[in-house]
Image (cartoon, rainbow, N blue to C red):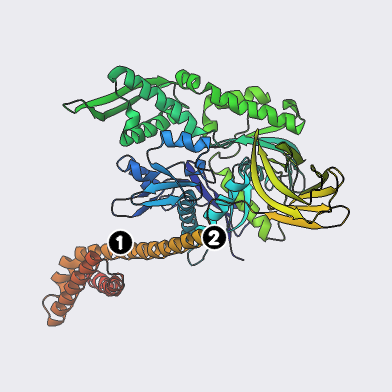
Amino acid sequence: MERVIGIDLGTTNSCVAIVDDDGVPQVIPNRGGYKTTPSIVAITEAGRRLVGHIAKRQAITNAENTVYTAKRLIGRKWDSAPVRSARQSVSYTIEEGPHGDVRIRLRDQAYSVQEISAMILQEMKLVAEEAYPGETISRAVITVPAYFNDGQRQATKDAGQIAGLEVIRIINEPTAAALAYGYGKSLNKMVAVFDLGGGTFDISILEIGEGGVFKVVATAGDTFLGGEDFDLRIMDWLIDGFKKEHGVDLRQDRMALQRLKDAAEKAKCELSAVSEVDINLPFIISHGPTNEALHLQRQIDRATVENLCADLVQRCIEICQGTLKDAQLGAAEIDEVVLVGGMTRMPAVQKACAAFFKREPSKGVHPDEVVAVGAAIQGKALTDEHEDLILLDVTPHALGLLTAGNNFDELIAQNTTVPTSATKTFTTSRDQQTAVKILVMQREGTENQLLGEFLLTGLRSAPKGQVEIEVTFAIDSDGIVSVSAKDTETGLEQSIQVTASSGLTQEEIGQMMESAEEYMIERKESDELEGAKQQAEKLVSEVEKLFPQVEAVVSSSDFGREALAKARDVIVKTKDAIERRDAAQLKEQGEALSRTLKMFKGVASRPS
């Protein structure tokens, strides 16, 4: 059976996990041994793509062409408030796409957010394939914030498709965390998953029952509330202080912004363990007619950061209050609070969470890895008929119709368990009306978003209010929405399957898939070449070390001198192949070098 990986496509870091052959879920470390990979993509001056740690290391010197926090932009419209906010704070260029979507300019090319996300997903795919040599891994469960809307979920699916993955399920991050928390245990608990990551906040209430049943009771969140916002508060504090001291606005310098971002994030993390930290950024900017180098030196303490970010923490608690109310539960009825996401390491967040739920949160799961582990468990459950796990999730947003007077008429409430369906009867609003337009809407907070529309025509002509139209909404377990409308008297019916748009056409997705596939071929060839190069360099070094010893033993005979000449020739040809990056020649000379080394070791081991 082909393996299914679970991927937590995070705002700050991403993680990949799998359920091994013994049924044990585990995180797969990347080549550097790290269990998480920074969700960062860069394009170098030479046009080379960098992903993860290597992209993060060069971010300051290549700030304009390094993308971070792309997840905050995925599936969003160019004119949306979050995108306007991001344009003011990131060091790279955000442009309007051809469909009113978001594009990111790197070097001379504009990339869709889905393409950037696909580059990170490809990296996760490669991490998994390197852990299982000879296997092609093409199926995945990918997690998203519980409060992501249909457009954001579809955009994430498209990113998976571009990356060469069959996304067999999109699963909510807090739900995935709960699966990992309860997997293999006999529990009967009401659990709150408090998930504050780099870019988003979710709170989900789940009922975990015996027999592997996980039922989501209620979920809510904010897709633009996370660690990035905490970093920005520290950045603003540093920038405002510097401006007051020197009269210079650091927001105008992209490299300075990137250095400030790194320093703010580092300070925030350190302040979870210590009470104060020094921030030193020498030569942050040159200023004035003489280009005088200015330095930033500030000390910041935990209390200052907590004060700067108090409203962000409070926002999380307010969302928790609303979710408990939706679930019709009191804080005392929650048996366990599970903390997920790197920001939950902040003492102020833990303190606020404990105060609200009136209990110390559980620290029994790894906040950075648990979501990927849960996704892998769901992947196993979906593909293994022997896996005894039942997941009952909910729709995070209310669904309904836009009726006369621009009113939202709800058919399916937020937090309704899926799959589900609901039917409601409406009447015509005008005399002799022979057609009605059905506008399918999704309510997100106080905003209404159009998901799709269709026309029901051929209605009998009658005074207003006398033609009854029965509208049915249905959501399947994959979250696909179907809507039908029927004239109750004539039986005339029309329907639509609502397919959310991510802002890309199928043609664009196809072209991006081809480009991604070409990159993967080039990347694998490059990795193979690099491996062959390293192996050849190691063999050359070992042969050269043994040369004096072997020469002393065999140089007195014609056969020995001939063997030494051949060895020198092999070394010269290998070094030439390394220089020219000739994979075929490297392979050939590598085999010759291996034979030479074997012979040299045999000679060197003879008794003198």
Q: Can you give x and y, in whole percent of width and height, for residue 34 in the image?
A: 44, 47
Q: Residues within 10 Å of mark 2 (few under 14, many from 20)?
A: few
Q: Residues within 10 Å of mark 1 (few under 14, many from 20)?
A: few
Q: Which residue is mark 2?
A: 506
Q: Can you give x and y, in whole percent of width and height, for residue 64 in the image?
A: 34, 42
Q: Can you give x and y, in whole percent of width and height, for residue 495 in the image?
A: 74, 56
Q: Can you give x and y, in whole percent of width and height, for residue 442 in the image?
A: 67, 42
User: Left of 395 or right of it: where is 594?
Assistant: left
Q: Secondary structure at mark 2?
A: helix
- 428 versus 168 height, above or below: above
User: Left of 431 or right of it: where is 57?
Assistant: left
What is the three-letter code of the residue carrying label 2? Gln
Q: Along the line of sight, which residue is nearer the eye, 21 or 2?
A: 2
First reached walking from the N terminus: tag 2 or tag 1 = 2
User: Left of 180 or right of it: where is 537?
Assistant: left
Q: Along the line of sight, which residue is nearer the eye, 90 or 524?
A: 90
Q: Which residue is mark 1?
A: 534
- 182 versus 604 height, above or below: above
- Looking at the figure, which quarter contains the N terminus? bottom right
Foreground label between 2 and 1: 2
Q: Secondary structure at mark 1?
A: helix
**Residue 514 seen:** yes
Q: Residue at x 32, y 39 (%)?
A: 60
What is the three-letter code of the residue carrying label 1? Gln
Q: Along the line of sight, which residue is nearer the eye, 211 or 312?
A: 312
